[in-house]
Image (spheres, grey):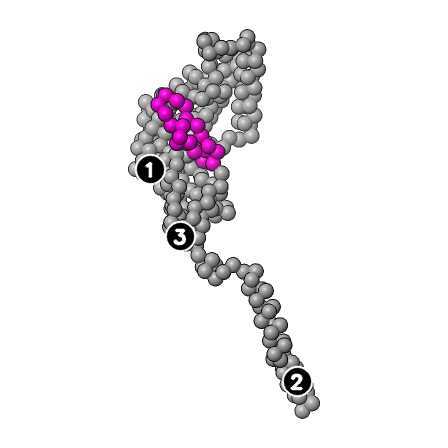
Amino acid sequence: MLEGKTNKQILRGFLAAEMLAFYAALLAVILSQLPPLYEIFEKAKAEISMDGWVTISHGLGQPRAMLPITISNDGSATLIVDSINCELINIATKKTWKMKAVTYVDQSSVQPFVQTREIPLGRLRRVPNSQWSETIHCVTQPSPAQVEAYQSIFMEMTDYLNSLPRLSPDSPAVVFPDEIWTKAREQFEVNFGLTPGDYVIKLSIFGDLNEEASHTSNKFQVSRGDITKLKRHVNSYKFGGGIIVPGNGSYDVSKVIN
């Protein structure tokens, strides 16, 4: 009986008004650290689409792709996009070139016969029921050895330019010595692996390291003529094209992908 009476007393102590008020205050503090319930159940809903075409080029043989895309958020929470990945896939051989979107076109700079400006692509935030439509530029991520080779060629060309008399707008185009620019051609021959055939482009967007959405284009054909055209970029290397100045865009190849 004494033990039962003690337990009842303990129970009354827990249920005393003062203690109940303390528990309520403690629970309020804990709940205040949590997001509202409606936020807990909210979720972003990401979609990505390609808007009609892709232009394929390369940097010292490594494929690059420029294409207009749209990222939509039809969910009820803010969508965070950390990165946009792009894959160029040869359907027959399954060979895949992995690329990453690094810039997008500044639409205010788009004018005939003028080199467009590109804006570095950072983290994207899309509120619910909104979209982001831009033309992105995807590049193949080079290996450390390829970066070192590119930097070496770039520095040799820069040093050669600095050794010349002061240039003016009327000066003829600089032609680099064979021992410099042919190193760029050698890198191209090592890196260039595109062959005629059917290809697709796959886009994926990632947030917090998780894939949020992906989309694969319809197949498109890269012909022998397209390969020949892309290889003509090499002709620009002797003038620094695609290395220290923009490459010749007329050698790029554009395809319909819808």
Is 23 within the magenta? Answer: no
Q: Are marks 1 and 3 in contact (CB under 8 Å)?
A: no
Is residue 132 shown above or below 249? Answer: below
Of the residues shown, which amino acid type is indicated by label 3?
Gly
Q: Where is mark 3, residue-wise?
A: 75
Q: With 1 as the anchor, is 163 left or right in this view?
A: left
Pointer 3: residues within 10 angstroms few (<14), some, or many (20+)? some
Q: Earlier in the sequence, mark 2 or mark 1?
A: 2
Q: Are marks 2 and 1 in contact (CB under 8 Å)?
A: no
Question: In terms of image quadrants, where is residue 205?
Answer: top left
Q: Nearer the viewer, mark 2 or mark 1?
A: 2
Rendered-image quadrant of the N terminus:
bottom right
Q: Residue at x 38, y 46 (%)?
A: 130
Q: Which mark is residue 51?
A: 1
Residue 64 horizontal/vertical position (percent): 42, 30
- CA separation, marks 1 and 3? 21 Å
Residue placed most toward the observer, 86 or 208: 208
Pointer 1: residues within 10 angstroms few (<14), some, or many (20+)? some
- CA separation, marks 2 and 3? 53 Å
Q: With 37 as the anchor, is 163 left or right in this view?
A: right
Which element carries disc 2, helix, strand or loop? helix
Which element carries disc 3, helix, strand or loop? loop
Residue 67 horizontal/vertical position (percent): 37, 33
Q: Which residues are magenta?
A: 95-121
Is 104 within the magenta? Answer: yes
Q: With 169 as the anchor, is 67 left or right in this view?
A: left
Q: Which mark is residue 9?
A: 2
